[in-house]
Image (tube, rainbow, N blue to C red):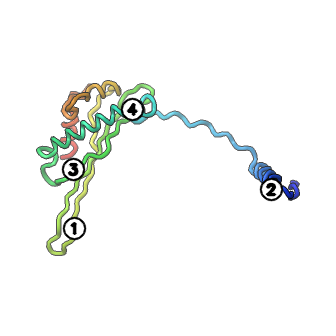
């Protein structure tokens, strides 16, 4: 391989370096495009961010219902501080059917050890699943949970509520 001789012009030197880099590297191998995902997050069905507003609104209404129901139900007992975290649903991209919905929760309990003064902690987490029936579409799920109290509204194809599912999960 013959290298070009150095030049007095900076642009000629730069061109020579680029030519050398391309010669050494060779042609770039074309990679196949990535396959389309089989499943997407509900907020991204049928296109990215298509259901963001509806799902965010649903999440806020579910969290408000949880905050109202928690003191007299889930939050009595071993832990005093339950917090809803992330809510997500998996959707089959080709059909729009909901595979599974999960709502993550955390709780905490802190105590002072009287002998040492150290803080003792318990911090469990849960991933609670909504009972979605086979064939439930995104549209059917969102319609079933539309309204001011989605925590207590019946889910399609199961007749159960999110409240009942949380009771089974958090106890």
Which callout, 4 or 3, points at the residue further toward the start of the chain? 3
Q: Residue drawn 33% across and 31% down?
A: 54
Q: What's the mark number on residue 82?
A: 3
Q: Secondary structure at mark 4?
A: strand
Disc 4 target residue: 91
Q: Earlier in the sequence, mark 4 or mark 2?
A: 2
* Residue 49, image x, y percentages: 42, 34
For the residues labelled 1 and 3, the Cα–Cα distance comes to 19 Å
Asked if marks 2 and 1 touch (Cβ < 8 Å), the reply is: no
Q: Do the residues bearing badges 1 and 3 touch, measured as CB atoms within 8 Å? A: no
Looking at the image, do the residues carrying marks 4 and 3 touch, with CB atoms under 8 Å apart? no
Judged left or right of residue 127, residue 148 is left
Q: Nearer the viewer, residue 8 or 22?
A: 8
Residue at the extreme left of the image, as rendered: 72
**Circle 1 residue:** 119
**Residue in the image at 11% along x and 44% along y:** 72
Residue at label 2? 10
Q: Is residue 162 visible?
A: yes
Left or right of 96: which side holds 87?
Answer: left
Q: Quadrant of the N terminus?
A: bottom right
Q: Judge depth for marks 2 and 1 and give the one in front.
A: 2
């Amino acid at each position: 391989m013959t290298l070009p001789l150095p030049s007095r012009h900076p642009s000629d030197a730069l061109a020579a370096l680029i030519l050398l880099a391309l010669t050494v590297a060779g042609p770039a191998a074309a990679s196949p495009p990535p396959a389309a995902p089989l499943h997407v997050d509900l907020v991204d069905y049928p296109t990215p961010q298509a259901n963001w507003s509806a799902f965010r609104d649903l999440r806020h209404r579910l969290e408000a219902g949880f905050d109202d129901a928690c003191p007299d139900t889930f939050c009595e007992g071993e832990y005093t501080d339950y917090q809803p975290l992330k809510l997500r649903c998996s959707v089959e991209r080709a059909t729009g059917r909901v595979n599974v919905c999960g709502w993550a929760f955390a709780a905490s309990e802190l105590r002072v050890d009287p002998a040492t003064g150290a803080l003792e902690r318990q911090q469990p987490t849960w991933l609670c699943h909504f009972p979605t029936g086979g064939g439930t579409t995104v549209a059917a799920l969102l319609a079933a949970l539309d309204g001011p109290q989605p925590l207590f509204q019946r889910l399609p194809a199961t007749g159960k509520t999110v409240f009942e599912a949380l009771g089974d999960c958090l106890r």
